[in-house]
């Protein structure tokens, strides 16, 4: 009996140990080492780094030293064409346009494309009213600036009081300026001096020379590149900084890449 009891107890212990091992094995199988492949969370900062954006630079228009230089670049071709057709010096046309329209920024030029301050005088087209010698005077209004230049040519060519102008040499801008005032184009006694000053300051007479087939007095030009300074350019062309600024109507020492500078002084006897 004692043997039987002992055997029974041993059997229970064996079964109990076996069951424990079996359970342990199952647990091990149900909890293996798991390797999970996940994509790390990407922060906004990291996303910005990963995104490649192709940016096309904006096309940069040609840069001018001032609004007058820009005006000359825009309208010089039209002024030369008017000179070929009607015999009015391009230099005079440009100088008058610059003066009368504030280099294209005045109200009449902006709102009416009227660059020469031509009043109605029987005009049957569109009109604009603007304070001048008197309050709210009538001025001509054009669809396009080019018509203002053409009307300016016709205005001078078709009026008898301006006939003396057309007896002058086409490159005699000084006498053209003087006779314009005498003929009554402007009441300002300094009007001729203002025109002549603009023509010489911006070398507008070079456009007359081109139309007349004469050698221009200003073949030497310099295109500004990165790193250029007025001092360096003046040394390169053997002129002073003040001369360089005067030739190009510069008010400051600032330059822009691609800017075209005149670098040859005008002969005094031109």
Image (cartoon, helix red, strand yellow):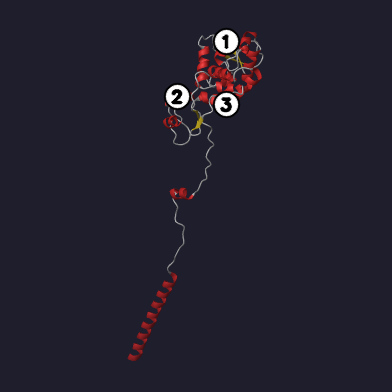
Taking the image as shown, residue 88 lies to the left or right of residue 189, namely: right
Real-space Cα separation, disc 3 to disc 2, in angstroms: 25 Å
**Are circles 3 and 2 on residues that touch, CB within 8 Å?**
no
Q: Nearer the viewer, mark 2 or mark 1?
A: 2
Q: Which residue is mark 2?
A: 243
Real-space Cα separation, disc 2 to disc 1, in angstroms: 30 Å
Real-space Cα separation, disc 1 to disc 3, in angstroms: 27 Å
Q: Nearer the viewer, mark 3 or mark 2?
A: 2
Q: Quadrant of residue 100?
A: top right
Q: Position of residue 233 (x, y in %)?
A: 45, 31
Mark 2 Cα shell of 10 Å, populated few (<14), some (14-19), many (≥20):
some
- Give the mark nearest the N terminus, 1 or 3: 3
Q: Position of residue 247 (x, y in %)?
A: 48, 24
Mark 3 Cα shell of 10 Å, populated few (<14), some (14-19), many (≥20):
few
Q: Which residue is mark 3?
A: 74
Taking the image as shown, residue 221 lies to the left or right of residue 147, namely: left
- 209 over 124 or under it: above or below: below
Callout 1 secondary element: helix
Q: Position of residue 147 (x, y in %)?
A: 64, 20
- 78 over 47 or under it: above or below: above
- 76 over 227 or under it: above or below: above
Mark 1 Cα shell of 10 Å, populated few (<14), some (14-19), many (≥20):
some
Q: Position of residue 235 (x, y in %)?
A: 43, 30
Residue depicted at x 55% and y 21% = 205
**Front in this rendered view, residue 105 or 179:** 179
Taking the image as shown, residue 16 lies to the left or right of residue 175, namely: left
Callout 3 secondary element: helix
- Give the mark nearest the N terminus, 2 or 1: 1
Q: Which residue is mark 1?
A: 179
């Amino acid at each position: 009996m004692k043997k039987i009891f002992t055997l029974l107890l041993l059997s229970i212990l064996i079964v109990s140990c076996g069951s424990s091992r079996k359970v342990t094995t199952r647990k091990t199988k149900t909890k293996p080492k798991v390797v999970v492949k996940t994509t790390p969370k990407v922060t906004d900062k990291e996303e910005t780094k990963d995104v490649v954006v192709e940016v096309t630079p904006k096309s940069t228009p040609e840069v001018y030293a001032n609004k007058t230089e820009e005006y000359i670049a825009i309208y010089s071709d039209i002024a030369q064409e008017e000179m070929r057709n009607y015999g009015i010096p391009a230099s005079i046309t440009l100088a008058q346009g610059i003066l009368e329209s504030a280099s294209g920024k005045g109200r009449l030029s902006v709102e009416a494309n009227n660059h020469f301050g031509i009043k109605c005088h029987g005009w049957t087209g569109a009109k604009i009213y603007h304070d001048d010698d008197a309050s709210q005077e009538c001025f001509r209004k054009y669809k396009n600036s080019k018509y203002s230049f053409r009307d300016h040519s016709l205005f001078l060519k078709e009026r008898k009081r301006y006939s003396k102008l057309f007896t002058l040499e086409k490159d005699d801008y000084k006498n053209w300026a003087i006779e314009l005032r005498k003929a009554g184009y402007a009441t300002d006694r300094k009007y001729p001096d203002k025109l002549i000053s603009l023509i010489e300051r911006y070398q507008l007479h070079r456009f007359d020379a081109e139309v007349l087939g004469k050698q221009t007095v200003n073949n030497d030009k310099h295109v500004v590149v990165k790193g250029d300074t007025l001092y360096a350019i003046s040394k390169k062309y053997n002129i002073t900084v003040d001369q360089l600024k005067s030739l190009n109507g510069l008010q400051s020492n600032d330059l822009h890449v691609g800017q075209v500078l005149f670098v040859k002084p005008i002969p005094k006897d031109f």
